[in-house]
Image: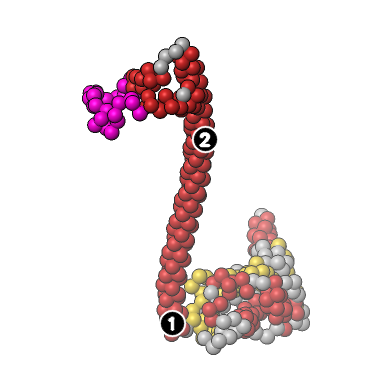
Amino acid sequence: MFLYIILPVTLVIALYIFMKAVPPASARIIVNRFDGRIKVLATGMHFYVPFFWAAYGTGPFTGLSSNKVDSPAHGTKIQIDPPKACIHTADGISGTVDVTVYASILPWDKRVVSAKGHFKVLATQVIHRWLSSIVGQLQADEVVFHNLSTHLNTKKNIGELNADLSIFCLEVNAVYMDTSGIQLSSIYTQQRNNINARMQLLAEEKRKVESEIKLQELRYNRDKRAAELKFLRGQEEVRRLNSLAKQKAIGDAEAALIAVKSGLAQAQIKKEMRVVEDQAMIEQVAKLMEKGIDSHDIANLLVVRESAKALALSKADKIVAVPPSMCGLFGLDLVRSGLGQIGTKSVSEGLK
């Protein structure tokens, strides 16, 4: 009965002592206590006698493992946060840069136990030299977060860092940096801040000047456009006035021509009427003389008729009879004597 109890208990104790579990993403190095042989146990359950085999610990992976017994396995992602690195820029400005490196564990074997030193410490020194080399190629005004972060993560720079870290079984995936990870000389920083402040003022002044110039250009274009429109309207008005003046001149010329033609026509009509009247008068005088009427009487008749016409055409309101002698006329004796001497033919010609 005692055996049935002691055997299971012994078996459980033995399993607890001799069965060892290696956690995920880890590998365990064990060393034989007697002959110094080395084994590397992968993730999982393993059976070995602690009396013969002792755990080597993290060895060169100290500081990179999640515990004090096991080392990180191949492919494990780790984070290295080295102290701030002292740097000098290409133009001699001193400062510090603080970065965080994310890396993966490269394949390794039991030979790592022969490595001297801790990989984390050695890798930190390599990272510092790498940072100093990259920053030393940049001017101080180029050492800003976005620019330096881009430089650190270029394929070329990461490749150079991995070439130096491969002996420590590390392969860098990315280098990250806090926004406050760059600290340059306080004197330089103050001077740069002053310069930036002045540059901002100059930039603001430049924007104001450019805005004023643009506004002046807009005003100039507006005034130019207004002047062009005014000039075009003036030209249109001149053309309109010229057209009206031309039309008026043509109209006046046509009216004058019509008036001249009308005057000529009226003169021609008057002339023809005068000729007709003279011809009629000559015929009347001839008929009167044929009937034996004295030329003196005929002249009186003609005077009377002409006087009647004059009185009819006169626009005077009052007519005053004046003796002929007051005007230098002495009756019809002169006319009579003239008619008597000249005869019928002369009278006819005078009437014409």
For this orientation, the residue located farthest to the bottom is 92
- In front: label 2 or label 1: 2
Along the line of sight, which residue is nearer the eye, 144 or 155?
144
Residue nearest the observer in this picture, 220 or 252: 252
Q: Tell me the residue at 45%/75% (across/down).
A: 199
**Label whose residue precedes the other's in the sequence (2 or 1):** 1
Q: Is residue 251 above or below residue 139?
A: above
Res 30 quadrant in image: bottom right
Give the residue number, with chain letter if any, for mark 2: 257
Residue 282: % across, % down: 49, 20
Image quadrant assignment for residue 76: bottom right
Magenta segment main secondary structure? loop
Q: Secondary structure at mark 1?
A: helix
Image position of 303 with respect to 156: above or below: above
Residue type at tag 2: Leu
State whether residue 126 appears in this view.
Answer: yes
How far from the left and from the top, in percent, is residue 275?
51, 24
Residue 330 part of the magenta segment: yes
Report the residue marked by disc 1: 191
